[in-house]
Amino acid sequence: MTNLDQDWPEPIVRVQSLSESGCPVIPTRYIKPPTDRPTASAAASDAVNIPIIDVHGFCLDQDDALRDTILRQVSDACRNWGFFQITNHGIRAELLDDIRQGWHDFFQLPVEIKQGYANNPRTYEGYGSRLGVQRGAILDWSDYFFLHYLPPHLKDHNKWPAAPPCLRELIEEYGEEVVKLGGRLLKLLSLNLGLQEGYLRNAFGGEDVGACLRVNYYPKCPQPELTLGLSSHSDPGGLTLLLPDDQVAGLQVRNAHKWITVKPAPHAIIVNVGDQVQVLSNAIYRSVEHRVIVNSNKERVSLAFFYNPKSDIPIEPAKELITEDKPALYSPMTFDEYRLFIRMRGPQGKSQVESLKSPR
Ligand code: OGA
Ligand code: NI
């Protein structure tokens, strides 16, 4: 069924090198069909933004008004948006700035050095320029670096960039913080769904959760109106914690058929629900389509940290959320099986999770 055992179907072209060539037109391979182009779609007014939730002073164990307020804000954001930003989340601002800068510097290294980390479709780990292995596919205007942080046996420092200095340590420290934050968020979501606090984390495999980092690099683009930095998709995993670029906007979230451009608050982390939470919550929470637009003036760097279920355990709707009115919408499936789709076909909106609905 898969051709993931092989290499990429075509020679890899680094989008950064296309950008730096100074050519005023983009190759045909990057030109999206008219309906997918950024200018073709209804854009909402600039005043709209995804919810910003200040979690300063939040403590789950402390039964007070603040706790209730924040639980409610997160609940509303999950139901209405599937996306929110959190501020005062406890991760040091300096760490956020340093790791973003570290990755920025990595992408400025000579291409020969980066090629030493070139990835392949078997594991996707390393330096990549496409998602999906379909020959002739229309490609996105971005390069990326993908690495495993958890489980420990998949973590391999030798596959992480050796330069710039300190980047490995920064990834270690950032990973630890984001995993803690992801765990806390899962508790919050579990409670909001009316489940035991530990439900979602246990369903994710408890101590054995998975976590990986995808650093996106969106080079300047001479014809941004014709392409996308990342095509519309929902994230296949559990929860995504995104550190956006602090200088350049680009992430757009679909809400009521409009594309909302996210305006990140300073040092905020953007959180979104992935397909596995949609399955576990029996679609009470839904993963939401998002995409990235590019521009001709500035490159953009973002760090998407994916907090995922252990890859070989079946994920299915929580029994507590199944009723006569609302039977289980999905059959059990492991995340390993699930993620083959995006790894073969690339970003395709929400077609995968929608196709999973069990026949009734
Ligand atoms: C992703 C993603 C958004 C961004 O990597 O899955 O949606 O702003 N990234 O780069
Ligand atoms: Ni995404």
Image (cartoon, rainbow, N blue to C red):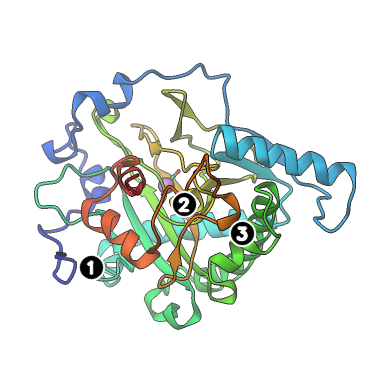
Secondary structure beneath disc 2?
helix
Residue that numbered label 3 is attached to: 182
What is the x, y in percent for residue 39? 31, 20
Can residue 273 be seen?
Answer: yes
Q: Earlier in the sequence, mark 3 or mark 2?
A: 3
| Side of 130 where 58 appears, left or right | right
* Residue at 35% across, 56% down: 144
Quarter of the image for residue 146 reads bottom left
Q: Nearer the viewer, mark 3 or mark 2?
A: 2
Q: Amino acid at mark 3?
A: Gly
Residue that numbered label 2 is attached to: 279
Secondary structure beneath disc 3?
helix
Can residue 230 be seen?
Answer: no
Is 259 placed above or below 194 here? above
Quarter of the image for residue 183 reads bottom right
Distance from Cα at disc 3 to Cα at disc 2: 18 Å
Secondary structure beneath disc 1?
loop
Which residue ends up furthest to the front in the rendered image?
324
Q: Which quarter of the rendering shows the C terminus?
A: top left
Q: Amino acid at mark 2?
A: Val
Ligand 1 within 8 Å of disc 1? The answer is no
What is the x, y in percent for residue 156? 42, 80
Q: Nearer the viewer, residue 140 or 198?
A: 198
